[in-house]
């Protein structure tokens, strides 16, 4: 079985961060989002992974390399334009060959791994091949992962009959047939290539994976479903990304490899990476402080991730993600924030007081 991770797309909903960085490389708990998907595949025994890349392909290749650090082999498959998920399958056909494969959206965060997801598909296929006194059941051609959501109009939605069979898929329906949204994880047999070749672009000009799966169903192939265990978040916007950060940090185990002076307090589950320095500060977990960062005369509160080589001085931070080499000085309270790489946030203290901002495109500034 192979893996296909989709890491294209412009990440417009995370601008200005994604003006200079791939959205799949924005960190959650100081680990790029994309790496979680690669690790999940490696844990499930998938060692051949194709990564679909777009305009940020060079950055993705630099971050991931050949995959050896994850115990996998990575093949990069460039996509000139974002023409739909089924288009990704089409351009990856040579890489995928006649193998089954898991397709994974690179900006998704799931609590559930892939081991059980793949295991249930394999068990179903094995059972279908066993002689039985009951009615013959064809092996599944695909498997989708579903999650109940309160707003199914925003997603691809599956209709499941009383026997648990997927009978219909609809993309962002005005009148949803169910509340079961498709999570961005799929398992396909090679039959999907026939389906992708048969469908036409949707009204928005994309080859929809929902149309390809519907083609399988309409042509008598069985598509099974699995219901998500645990949480699922699309990290394409700031608030879900911060929520993902909170969820991952909740599972943190304390590890202090850096330097913490006697005047500092460490409370709760905190990771201080080697090379980080904490001086006269209070760190209240769950928090992770990256290598080479310094925290001086400051308070770092719960659900914060400070990346490598940052400097936090005389400031208070809670529920925020601070990217590499940021410098935050004399900021009395910074909350619910995503701060980009190589940025400076400071308060001058000069009078008359005024707000002075230098910000990128598509920012939202909330001044209390």
Image (cartoon, grey):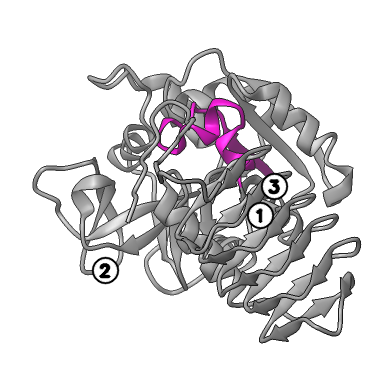
Q: Quick one: label 3 or label 1, which is nearer the N terminus?
A: 3
Q: Nearer the viewer, residue 240 or 100?
A: 240
Residue at the location (79% across, 47% down)?
47
Residue designated by label 1: 36
Say which quarter of the image contains residue 113: bottom right
Q: Position of residue 243 (x, y in %)?
A: 46, 63
Q: Position of residue 144 (x, y in %)?
A: 43, 53
Q: Quick one: label 3 or label 2, which is nearer the N terminus?
A: 3
- Secondary structure type for disc 3: loop
- The single residue placed furthest to the top in the displayed view is 80
Marks 3 and 1, how far apart at CA: 19 Å
Q: Which residues are magenta?
A: 1-26
How crowded is the residue under tag 1: few (<14 C-alpha within 10 Å), some, or many (20+)? some
Marks 3 and 2, how far apart at CA: 28 Å
Q: Nearer the viewer, residue 281 or 168?
A: 281
Q: Nearer the viewer, mark 3 or mark 2?
A: 3
Residue designated by label 3: 1
Say which quarter of the image contains residue 77: top right
For the image shown, how many numbered marks are present on the structure?
3
Residue 23 can be seen in this image: yes
Residue 16 lies in the magenta stretch:
yes
Image quadrant in which the C terminus is located: bottom left
Q: Position of residue 89 (x, y in %)?
A: 53, 29
Q: Position of residue 27 (x, y in %)?
A: 63, 50
- The single residue placed furthest to the front in the displayed view is 351
Q: Nearer the viewer, residue 292 or 219?
A: 292
* Whether residue 208 is situated above or below residue 247 in the rendered picture: above
Residue designated by label 2: 163
Q: Nearer the viewer, mark 2 or mark 1?
A: 1
Relative to 162, is 79 on the left or the right? right
């Amino acid at each position: 079985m192979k893996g296909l991770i989709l890491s294209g797309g412009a990440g417009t909903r995370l601008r200005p961060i994604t003006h200079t960085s791939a959205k799949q490389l924005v960190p959650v708990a100081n680990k790029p989002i994309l790496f979680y998907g690669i690790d999940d595949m490696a844990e499930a025994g998938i060692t051949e992974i194709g990564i679909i890349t777009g305009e940020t392909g060079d950055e993705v290749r630099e971050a991931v390399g050949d995959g050896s650090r994850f115990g996998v082999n990575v093949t990069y498959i460039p996509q000139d334009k974002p023409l739909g998920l089924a288009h990704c399958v089409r351009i990856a056909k040579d890489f995928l060959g006649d193998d089954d494969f898991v397709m994974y959206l690179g900006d998704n965060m799931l609590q559930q791994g892939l081991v059980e997801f793949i295991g249930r598909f394999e068990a179903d296929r094995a059972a279908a091949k066993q002689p039985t006194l009951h009615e013959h059941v064809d092996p599944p051609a695909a498997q989708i992962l579903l999650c109940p959501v309160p707003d199914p109009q925003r997603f691809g939605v599956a209709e499941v009959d009383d026997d648990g069979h997927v009978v219909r898929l609809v993309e962002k329906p005005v009148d949803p047939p169910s509340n079961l949204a498709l999570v961005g994880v799929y398992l396909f047999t090679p039959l999907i290539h026939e389906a992708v070749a048969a469908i036409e672009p949707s009204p928005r000009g994309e080859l929809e994976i929902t149309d390809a799966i519907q083609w399988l169903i309409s042509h008598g192939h069985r598509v099974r479903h699995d219901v998500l265990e645990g949480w699922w978040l699309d990290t394409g916007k700031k608030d879900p990304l911060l929520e993902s950060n909170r969820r991952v940090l909740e599972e943190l185990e304390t590890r202090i490899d850096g330097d913490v002076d006697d005047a500092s307090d460490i409370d709760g589950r905190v990771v201080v990476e080697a090379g980080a320095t904490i001086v006269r500060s209070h760190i209240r977990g769950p928090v992770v402080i990256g290598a080479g960062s310094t925290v001086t005369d400051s308070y770092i509160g719960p659900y914060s991730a400070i990346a490598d080589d940052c400097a936090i001085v005389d400031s208070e931070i809670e529920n925020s993600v601070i990217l590499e080499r940021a410098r935050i000085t004399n900021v009395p309270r910074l909350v619910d924030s995503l701060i980009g790489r190589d940025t400076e946030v400071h308060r001058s203290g000069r009078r008359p007081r005024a707000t002075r901002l230098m910000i990128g495109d598509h920012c939202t500034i909330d001044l209390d």
